[in-house]
């Protein structure tokens, strides 16, 4: 079961797999399974597993009353409720529960923990980015995606500082960390608020892109090309200039792949 390929349709997920996902006893293996998780059921299972009992009743009642069913609304809502629940508790209890969520075997539970970092108003941008790093490097695709979404708003609010901070991430040995720095700053992105400042003027992010313009990992290459593709919707000339310069300066197959994918929509329009 651990090495299953995963169903292509939610209705085709075996009942046993669905049950284990909702009990927090199994990780999802593809997007279909990830989207199929019942986060309300999972929350009940996790609070029971942690022996929180009646202590978690208020948290469960509020989430049960939450009418939104979309997963990208439920995850931050649950994270917010955990933060509220933790208010007034001692530091040891807060730390212990957070660590239990952040290290949980369920990727969906780790997604809650990632959003707890992003939504915690007590943390500075630097603290949030440091806290989100383990999730950016998580082995699970879903956690890595949620990680950059969780800190998207703080990044937008302090964009200049974030771009400076990420200068160290784009040269990290971990491809997941390099990719996070690019994906988190995409002007448009997926399922995320647009970064208007970079849509209007993408140049401030160029140092980050330059650092990975010939990255060996396709995971990073795809993010770089998608970043430029985003920018091409509002600044096509700038994207073409960057791509042409990269081609002149680097003859690697990695750069060629990035440039080709980056210009895919610009070539259609020309």
Image (spheres, helix red, strand yellow):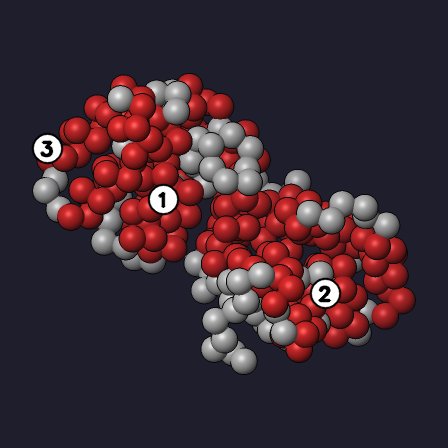
- In percent of width and height, residue 38 lies at 71, 61
Residue underneath mark 1: 223
Q: Earlier in the sequence, mark 3 or mark 2?
A: 2
- Residue closer to the observer: 187 or 30: 30
Cα distance between the residues tagged 2 and 1: 31 Å
Cα distance between the residues tagged 3 and 2: 52 Å
Residue 147 as seen in the image, left or right of residue 241: right
- Element class at badge 3: helix
Q: Residue at x 45, y 64 (%)?
A: 139
Q: Tell me if residue 14 comes above or below residue 127 in the rendering.
A: below
Circles 3 and 1: CB atoms closer than 8 Å: no
- In percent of width and height, residue 234 lies at 39, 21
Q: Earlier in the sequence, mark 2 or mark 1?
A: 2
- In percent of width and height, residue 114 lies at 58, 53
| Residue 204 visible to the viewer | no
Q: Earlier in the sequence, mark 3 or mark 1?
A: 1
Label annotation for residue 114 = none
Residue underneath mark 2: 42
Circles 2 and 1: CB atoms closer than 8 Å: no
- Element class at badge 2: helix
- Residue closer to the observer: 58 or 95: 58
Q: Quadrant of residue 36?
A: bottom right
User: Could you classify mark 1 by the number of other residues whose Cα lies within 10 Å: few (under 14), some (14-19), or many (20 or more)?
Assistant: many
- In percent of width and height, residue 120 lies at 65, 45
| Picture quarter with the C terminus | top left
Residue lying furthest bottom: 1
Residue underneath mark 3: 248
User: Could you classify mark 3 by the number of other residues whose Cα lies within 10 Å: few (under 14), some (14-19), or many (20 or more)?
Assistant: few
Residue 17 as seen in the image, left or right of residue 216: right
């Amino acid at each position: 079961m651990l090495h299953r390929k995963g169903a292509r349709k939610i209705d085709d997920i075996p009942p046993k797999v669905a049950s284990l996902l909702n009990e927090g006893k199994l990780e999802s293996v593809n997007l279909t399974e990830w989207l199929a998780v019942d986060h309300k059921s999972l929350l009940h299972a996790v609070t029971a597993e942690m022996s929180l009992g009646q202590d978690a009743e208020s948290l469960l009642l509020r989430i049960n009353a939450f009418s939104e069913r979309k997963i990208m609304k439920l995850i931050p809502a649950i994270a917010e409720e955990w933060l509220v629940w933790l208010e007034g508790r001692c530091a040891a209890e807060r730390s212990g529960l957070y660590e239990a969520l952040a290290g949980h075997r369920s990727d969906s539970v780790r997604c809650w923990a990632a959003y707890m970092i992003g939504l915690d108003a007590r943390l500075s941008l630097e603290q949030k980015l440091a806290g989100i790093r383990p999730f950016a490097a998580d082995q699970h695709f879903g956690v890595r995606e949620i990680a950059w979404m969780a800190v998207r708003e703080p990044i937008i609010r302090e964009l200049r500082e974030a771009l400076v901070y990420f200068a160290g991430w784009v040269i990290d040995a971990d491809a997941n960390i390099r990719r996070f720095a690019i994906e988190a700053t995409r002007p448009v992105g997926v399922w995320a608020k647009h970064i208007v400042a970079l849509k209007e003027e993408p140049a401030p992010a160029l140092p980050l892109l330059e650092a990975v313009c010939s990255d060996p990992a396709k995971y990073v290459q795809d993010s770089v090309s998608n970043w430029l593709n985003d920018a091409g919707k509002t600044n096509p000339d700038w994207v073409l200039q960057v791509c042409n310069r990269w081609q002149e300066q680097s003859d690697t197959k990695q750069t060629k792949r990035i440039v080709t994918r980056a210009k895919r929509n610009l070539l259609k329009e020309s």
